[in-house]
Image: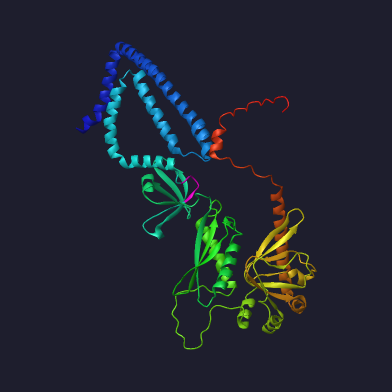
């Protein structure tokens, strides 16, 4: 059996070639006749089918370019999703298939349509989820609850599971989102149509965010509001965190840990994501609180066996003021006796919101240290007038040019919030500079940095002033009306004597 199994294949091949050799003329004639018939059929049908498909492809491309991307794209002022384009292509090629069956193969299309109806019912039952996704995608496109590039929130059963993401694409079955963690989420359109969606960028491109801070009861509401307001206004220097609409601080509620303050601000998600804005705002607010001597409250249980010790610092108390000032880089290297001697000569100044501490070109005889609040520096440019250079927050010093030989103020300082500052006279600080050269170098460095920021602010304002005014954006209705030629008004006839 093994021998036969090894011999039968070459034997069969030999017999086949032998039969072909004996009947080669008849086989060759049949091959030519059948080959000519097959080639003619393929050529004839292929040309007709190719003409129908190529014309359908051309029509589909013309519709995409001139209707979807041209007409609809200009009206909506955004990129048209793939879904309507894909549906257009499916309809056109389905019609082309029916025409090919009718004209090329001479088939009755009514029977094809009847048979396809029964098949469609079976397919519809099997693919009901996909069909639901398709029609929900059409509803999303028509209703336009969001568009590509919008930041949305998909509500879940619990608040901590809500999804905040940016819309990347809406196709015929799914919507693709990019989260703040830079991950892509694919959501079926049917699921998206059943849930609540919050669009952060409608009806306006900016939206409000909130962060909460809980402070101890011994911190007065006026002081807490002043510090937190200064912090959120300082955070507005970051791109994407808006100063208009103006942020605000609200006293939300009283808890067992302390008073909870809600800080509200607006962001432009085109430049910053919601999570990134929370990071920057929390960081800036915490920095202001710490430099102002305030520690956020936390869950605690205290048993007092002696006099209570306050964890937060109050600048109205000398010992607390000593700790606040020695935290700054300027006084960190001074000995205790040197700083105590200087502290006795400092002048406490309270500046109300909107008041000027000093103006540009005033006589300079002192420098200042900010303890609480937020101040802004303004420089008078030749062509642009008053220009904001930078902000001054708690823990920072300014006006150090007076201690380095300057005779005039190089900028104006205005309080953006109620602020508390301490003034140091030149005659009182000169002996310290003489003994500590490193402090003099530090002051020179900060003075140079502030000068460079002031110059950059003036140059930026000058470049903005030279830009041409932007053209007024046309509405969708104006764009539609401009597609048709306007009729010229009738020429008016004036009569004699008029």
Q: Residue at x 42, y 19 (%)?
A: 47
- Horizontal side of 299 relative to 36 (left or right) equals right
- Horizontal side of 100 relative to 294 (left or right) equals left
Q: Is residue 311 visible?
A: yes
* Depicted 111 relative to depicted 382: above or below: above
Q: Residue at x 72, y 52 (%)?
A: 462
**Residue 174: percent from left, percent from top:** 40, 44
Q: Between 356 and 279, which is closer to the camera in this rendering?
A: 356
| Furthest residue toward front | 497
Q: Residue at x 36, y 14 (%)?
A: 36
**Residue 221: percent from left, percent from top:** 54, 72
* Depicted 124 relative to depicted 109: above or below: below
Q: Is residue 104 visible?
A: no
Which quadrant does the C terminus fall into?
Answer: top right
| Chain part drawn in magenta | 146-151
Q: Residue at x 58, y 28 (%)?
A: 485
* Depicted 67 relative to depicted 267: above or below: above
Total numbered badges shown on the rendered structure: 0
């Amino acid at each position: 059996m093994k021998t036969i199994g090894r011999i039968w294949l070459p034997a069969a091949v030999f017999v086949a070639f032998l039969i072909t050799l004996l009947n080669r003329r008849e086989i060759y004639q049949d091959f030519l006749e059948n080959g000519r018939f097959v080639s003619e059929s393929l050529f004839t049908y292929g040309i007709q089918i190719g003409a129908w498909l190529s014309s359908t492809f051309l029509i589909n491309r013309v519709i995409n370019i001139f209707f979807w991307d041209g007409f609809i794209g200009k009206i909506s002022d955004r990129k048209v999703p793939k879904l309507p384009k894909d549906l257009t292509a499916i309809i056109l090629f389905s019609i082309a298939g029916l025409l090919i069956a009718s004209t090329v193969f001479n088939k009755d299309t009514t029977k094809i349509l009847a048979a396809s109806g029964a098949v469609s019912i079976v397919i519809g039952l099997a693919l009901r989820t996909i069909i639901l996704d398709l029609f929900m995608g059409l509803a999303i496109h028509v209703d336009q609850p969001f568009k590509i590039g919008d930041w949305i929130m998909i509500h879940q059963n619990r608040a901590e599971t809500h999804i905040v993401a940016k819309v990347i694409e809406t196709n015929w079955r799914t919507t693709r989102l990019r989260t703040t963690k830079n991950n892509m989420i694919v959501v079926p359109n049917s699921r998206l149509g059943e849930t609540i969606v919050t669009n952060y960028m409608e009806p306006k491109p900016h939206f409000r965010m909130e962060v909460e801070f809980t402070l101890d009861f011994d911190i007065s509401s006026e002081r807490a509001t002043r510090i937190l307001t200064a912090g959120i206004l300082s955070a507005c220097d970051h791109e994407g965190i808006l100063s208009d609409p103006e942020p605000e601080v609200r006293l939300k509620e009283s808890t067992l840990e302390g008073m909870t303050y809600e800080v509200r601000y607006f962001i432009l998600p085109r430049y910053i994501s919601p999570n990134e804005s929370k990071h920057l705002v929390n960081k800036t607010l915490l920095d202001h609180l710490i430099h102002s001597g305030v520690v956020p409250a936390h869950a605690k249980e205290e048993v007092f066996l002696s006099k209570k010790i306050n964890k937060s610092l109050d600048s109205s108390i000398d010992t607390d003021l000593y700790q606040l000032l020695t935290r700054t880089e300027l006084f960190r290297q001074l000995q205790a006796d040197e700083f105590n001697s200087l502290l006795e000569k400092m002048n406490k100044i309270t500046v109300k919101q909107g008041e000027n501490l000093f103006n540009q070109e005033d006589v300079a005889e002192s420098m200042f240290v900010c303890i609480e609040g937020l101040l802004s520096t303004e420089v008078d440019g030749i062509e642009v007038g008053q220009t904001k250079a930078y902000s001054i927050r708690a823990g920072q010093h300014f006006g150090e040019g007076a201690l380095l030989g300057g005779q005039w103020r190089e900028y104006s300082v205005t309080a953006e919030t109620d602020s508390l500052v301490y003034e140091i006279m030149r005659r009182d600080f000169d002996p310290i500079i003489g003994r500590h050269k490193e402090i003099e170098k530090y002051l020179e460095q900060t003075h140079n940095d502030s000068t460079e920021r002031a110059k950059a602010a003036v140059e930026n304002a000058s470049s903005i002033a030279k830009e041409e005014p932007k053209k007024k954006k046309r509405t969708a209705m104006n764009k539609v009306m401009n597609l048709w030629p306007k009729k010229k008004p009738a020429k008016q006839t004036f009569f004699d004597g008029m």
